[in-house]
Amino acid sequence: MSAGAQAAGLTVAGFLARCALSAARDLGRTASAVAGEREVIAEFFAASRYLGHVGSNLNQISRAINSGAHPTELDAVLAATERAVQRVQHAADQLVAHA
């Protein structure tokens, strides 16, 4: 998602909006296909917001580490975050490839 947005010179939100508008303008597609894509795009917006919250939590963890703490779940949280980011990126890349 971010790679596509960067290539287009847009923010991620702007890129997703442009994809949504492009899909809406394609009159050759069925209403169900458009509705399905709108659901996917809505999920990407939700995922983007969620990852923003995760980023805030990671900032809090960073502050704790900088003060000398080491949360026991840190490695698991970081690994799960990386997997989530990769899944969202892969899904966005696939969506763009099929657009």
Image (cartoon, grey):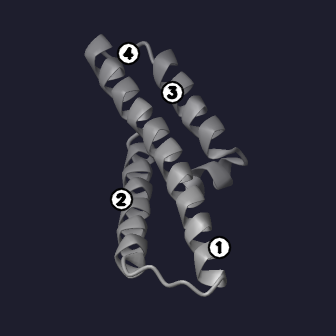
Characterize the local packing of mark 3: few (<14), some (14-19) or many (20 or more) Cα atoms within 10 angstroms. Answer: some
Which amino acid type is marked by label 4? Gly
- Mark 2: amino acid: Arg
Q: Residue at x 65, y 73 (%)?
A: 63
Which label was assigned to residue 4?
Answer: none
Q: Residue at x 38, y 58 (%)?
A: 90
Q: Nearer the viewer, mark 1 or mark 4?
A: 1
Gap between marks 1 and 4 measured at Cα? 52 Å
Vertical order, 84 against 76 (above or below): above
At mark 2, the secondary structure is: helix
Spot occupied by residue 25 in the image (x, y as percentages of width and height): 51, 17
Tell me: 15 left or right of 1: right
Q: Which numbered dot is residue 87?
A: 2
Instruction: Give me the C-alpha separation between circle 4 and circle 3.
Output: 15 Å
Give the mark, 1 or 3, whose residue is nearer the N terminus: 3
Q: Are discs 1 and 3 less than 8 Å apart at CB? A: no
Q: Which residue is mark 4?
A: 28
Tag 3's secondary structure? helix
| Spot occupied by residue 98 in the image (x, y as percentages of width and height) | 38, 42
What residue is disc 3 on?
Answer: 20
